[in-house]
Amino acid sequence: MITLNDDQQRRVERVLLRRGEVCPQCDSLELSSDGTAMQTMNNISVRVSCTNRSVEPPKGFAVSPSPRLTDHEAREVGINPR
């Protein structure tokens, strides 16, 4: 598990917003990094929560599956992809 600092969390959120990543449950763009990422042999996935307050379940539910970052996006966030 990789712990992200505040700056890296903001970068993750910018990357996901730029990509147009949405919550799979409500289609909201309001995704917030929970401060962790997972590195596997093939990719980096980031844990995020939906922060859309206008839908159920309430603010803060985890988005599953976790969005994956490309190697370029991981470097942009400050994570070495390999």
Image (tube, rainbow, N blue to C red):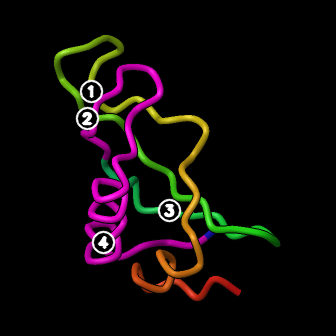
Please name the amino acid that badge 4 sits on.
Arg
Location of mark 4 (residue): 11
Kindly indicate whether the residue at mark 2 contacts the one at mark 1 (C-beta within 8 angstroms).
yes
Residue at position x 47%, y 75% in the image: 73
Q: Distance between the residues labelled 1 and 3?
A: 18 Å
Q: Where is residue 22 in the image (x, y as percent from the top left)?
A: 38, 37
Point out the tag, 4 or 1, that comes first from the N-terminus.
Answer: 4
Location of mark 3 (residue): 36
Please tell me whether residue 25 belongs to the stretch shown in magenta.
yes
Point out the tag, 4 or 2, that comes first from the N-terminus.
Answer: 4
Q: What element carries label 2?
A: loop
Side of 43 relative to 76 (left or right): right
Point out the tag, 1 or 2, that comes first from the N-terminus.
Answer: 2
Q: Which stretch did the figure color magenta?
A: 2-31
Residue 51 numbered tag: 2
Q: What element carries label 4?
A: helix
